[in-house]
Image (cartoon, helix red, strand yellow):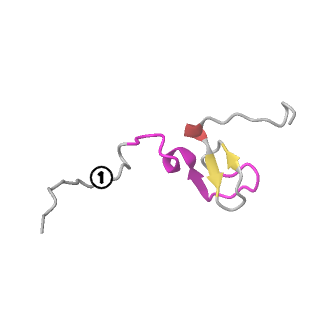
Amino acid sequence: MTSRMMEHIPLKSAFLCQDCDCVGNCATQCPACASTALLGLSAVLNRDGAEEFALPMPGYSYHPAMAA
């Protein structure tokens, strides 16, 4: 891959187009197909505010086994 083909997009500004599956850094429209169906990747990949989307862990308690 040549350096001209490689791109760097920070995760906070990366958006996935839901129509053509391209990643761009514009929050208003896809740079490839001009669609407005965009999804912010930092929210999906849980990089901003990991505690906000954290699932509660179930609590377990241990009891001695009952002997017959």
Residue that sits furthest to the right in the current view: 2
Q: Is the N terminus in the top left, top right, bottom left or bottom right quadrant?
A: top right
Residue lying at 27% horizontally and 55% vertically, measured from the top left: 58
Q: Amino acid at mark 1?
A: Pro
Residue corresponding to mark 1: 56
Residue sitting nearer the eye, 12 or 26: 12
Residue lying at 13% horizontally and 64% vertically, measured from the top left: 66
Residue lying at 60% horizontally and 55% vertically, measured from the top left: 38
Residue 55 at what x, y percent from top left? 34, 53
Residue 25 at what x, y percent from top left? 65, 42
Residue that sits furthest to the bottom in the current view: 68
Image side of residue 26 versus residue 3, left or right: left
Secondary structure at numbered mark 1: loop
Q: Is the C terminus in the top left, top right, bottom left or bottom right quadrant?
A: bottom left
Image side of residue 9 versus residue 51, left or right: right
The secondary structure that most of the magenta stretch takes on is: loop
Indicate whether residue 19 is drawn in magenta: no
Residue sitting nearer the eye, 33 or 55: 55
Residue 61 at what x, y percent from top left? 18, 54
- In this rendering, the answer to whether 15 lies above or below 18 is above
Q: Quadrant of residue 50?
A: top left
- In this rendering, the answer to whether 3 lies above or below 66 is above
Residue lying at 47% horizontally and 45% vertically, measured from the top left: 46
Q: Quadrant of residue 49?
A: top left
Residue that sits furthest to the top in the current view: 3
Q: Residues within 10 Å of mark 1 (few under 14, many from 20)?
A: few
Total marks placed: 1
Indicate whether residue 48 is drawn in magenta: yes
- Tell me which segment is drawn in magenta: 29-50
